[in-house]
Image (spheres, helix red, strand yellow):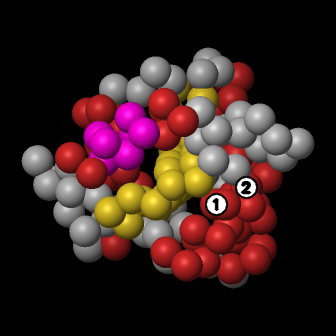
Amino acid sequence: MDRLKGLRVLIVDDDPDTLMLNQLVLQREGALTLTATGIREAIEAFRTGRPDIMLCDLNLGESADGCDLIRSLRDVTGRMIPAIAVSGMPRDMAGPRALKSGFSAYIEKPTHPGDLTKAIEAATASRT
């Protein structure tokens, strides 16, 4: 374990069960996790926690979505952060939009812990 040791990951999802599951998976791999259930919480967590990467559901159940969030974060902070979009929509439907919005990668739900860890490692490989 500890493949993500010390990595600060912001997890954004409006589903409490999914949020908790992803948090447990990433903590088991050594990540330090911050969580948010919506855009406002995510922006605040980003400002205070300075995450290394964001894992974000595309459908946040608000008037805005994950693509809006990543654009807002980059506008507000001026910082490019590696980010992985997660959605239950098929890759060919949501993946291109997520990547065009600025996400580094796209993963379909349900996520497999190993795939999630590999995607985060790949997206943050240049930080080491």
Q: Residue at x 21, y 49 (%)?
A: 29
Q: Residues within 10 Å of mark 1 (few under 14, many from 20)?
A: many
Compared with residue 90, is residue 62 higher up or lower down, i.e. above or below?
A: below
Q: Nearer the viewer, residue 29 or 85?
A: 29
Q: Residue at x 34, y 72 (%)?
A: 127
Name the spot of residue 13 as percent of width and height, x first: 59, 41
- Residues under numbered marks 2 and 1 in contact, where contact means CB atoms less than 8 Å apart: yes
Task: Name the element at disc 1.
Answer: helix
Picture disc at residue 10: none
Name the spot of residue 40 as percent of width and height, x first: 74, 61
Apparent side of residue 60 relative to residue 105 in the rendered image (left or right): right
Q: Residue at x 49, y 75 (%)?
A: 49
Picture disc at residue 39: 2
Q: Nearer the viewer, residue 11 or 109?
A: 11
For this orientation, the residue located farthest to the left is 1
Task: Name the element at disc 2.
Answer: helix
Apparent side of residue 6 relative to residue 71 in the rendered image (left or right): left
Q: Residue at x 32, y 63 (%)?
A: 32
Name the spot of residue 14 as percent of width and height, x first: 64, 39
Q: Amino acid at mark 1?
A: Ala
Q: Residues within 10 Å of mark 2 (few under 14, many from 20)?
A: many
The quadrant of the picture occupied by the C terminus is bottom left
**Magenta segment range?**
20-26
Reply yes or no: does residue 23 show up in magenta.
Answer: yes
Q: On the image, numbered disc 1 is attached to which residue?
A: 42
Apparent side of residue 13 relative to residue 82 in the rendered image (left or right): right
Compared with residue 120, is residue 127 higher up or lower down, i.e. above or below?
A: below
